[in-house]
């Protein structure tokens, strides 16, 4: 059985049929999945040799590759996480900077460029337990960081790191 869907048929404005190919993922999503597969393979190889990855260096190198606007945000988020949640270990996750507790991602930064979005994103997994009533945010759009934004991020990552 093929893993891609068959072509869909639709109609153009003039009534003629056109064919659209759909495979379920965008080019950017496929690239992120390939990066994640590479990360998992590297982890498996390291496990066999018992060599510990240098997550700090990997994250800093990935941040350095980002376009200026994303790089500035990612560097600042990285500094805030390191200062307010030192127990969270930096690592790459789908090719983006992430911070983990016991190997499981708690929060992550996604550059705007990665998925051709108009803003970068700071996201939190369910392990962060940011629960606040019956509805709460698990990701935040970032275009720049004010002092108030930085204080809020510090508060969120400290709360996420404290949950064990």
Image (cartoon, helix red, strand yellow):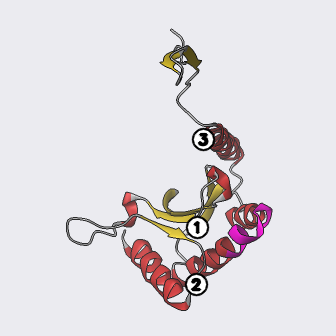
Q: Nearer the viewer, mark 2 or mark 1?
A: 2
Marks 2 and 3, the one that precedes in the sequence: 3
The residue indicated by pointer 1 is: 89
Q: Is residue 147 visible?
A: yes
Q: How far, Cα to Cα, is label 2 from label 1?
A: 12 Å
Residue 88, how many percent across, how many down?
53, 70
Residue 40, how many percent across, how many down?
63, 42
Marks 2 and 1, the one that precedes in the sequence: 2
Residue 83 badge: 2
Magenta residues span 64-72
**Residue at the top extreme, as displayed:** 1
Q: Is residue 99 visible?
A: no
Q: In the rendered view of the protein, which quadrant contains the C terminus?
A: bottom left
Marks 3 and 1, the one that precedes in the sequence: 3
Up-down relation of residue 32 to residue 101 (above or below)? above
Identify the residue shown where x is 55% and y is 18%: 4
Identify the residue shown where x is 67% and y is 43%: 35
Near mark 2 (Cα within 10 A), the count class, few <14, some 14-19 or many ≥20, is few
Q: Is residue 92 magenta?
A: no
Q: Is residue 139 left or right of residue 115?
A: left
Up-down relation of residue 67 to residue 27 (above or below)? below
Residue 29 badge: 3
Q: Is residue 38 left or right of residue 122?
A: right
Q: How far, Cα to Cα, is label 2 from label 3?
A: 31 Å
Magenta span: predominant SS is helix
**Residue at the left extreme, as displayed:** 134
Near mark 1 (Cα within 10 A), the count class, few <14, some 14-19 or many ≥20, is many
Question: In the picture, residue 48 is in which quadrant?
Answer: top right
Residue 89, how many percent across, how many down?
58, 67
Most foreground residue, 18 or 95: 18
Q: Nearer the viewer, mark 3 or mark 1?
A: 3
């Amino acid at each position: 059985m093929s893993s891609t869907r068959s072509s869909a048929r639709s109609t153009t404005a003039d009534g003629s049929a056109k064919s659209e190919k759909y495979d379920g993922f965008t080019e950017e999503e496929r690239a992120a999945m390939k990066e994640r597969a590479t990360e998992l393979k590297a982890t498996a190889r390291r496990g066999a040799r018992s060599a510990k990855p240098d997550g700090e260096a990997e994250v800093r190198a990935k941040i350095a590759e980002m376009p200026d606007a994303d790089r500035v945000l990612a560097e600042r988020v990285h500094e805030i996480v390191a200062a307010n949640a030192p127990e969270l270990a930096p690592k790459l996750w789908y090719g983006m900077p992430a911070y983990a507790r016991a190997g499981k991602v708690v929060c992550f930064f996604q550059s705007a460029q990665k998925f051709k979005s108009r803003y970068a994103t700071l996201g939190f997994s369910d392990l962060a337990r940011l629960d606040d009533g019956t509805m709460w945010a698990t990701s935040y759009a970032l275009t720049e960081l004010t002092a108030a934004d930085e204080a809020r991020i510090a508060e969120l990552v400290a709360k996420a790191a404290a949950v064990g």
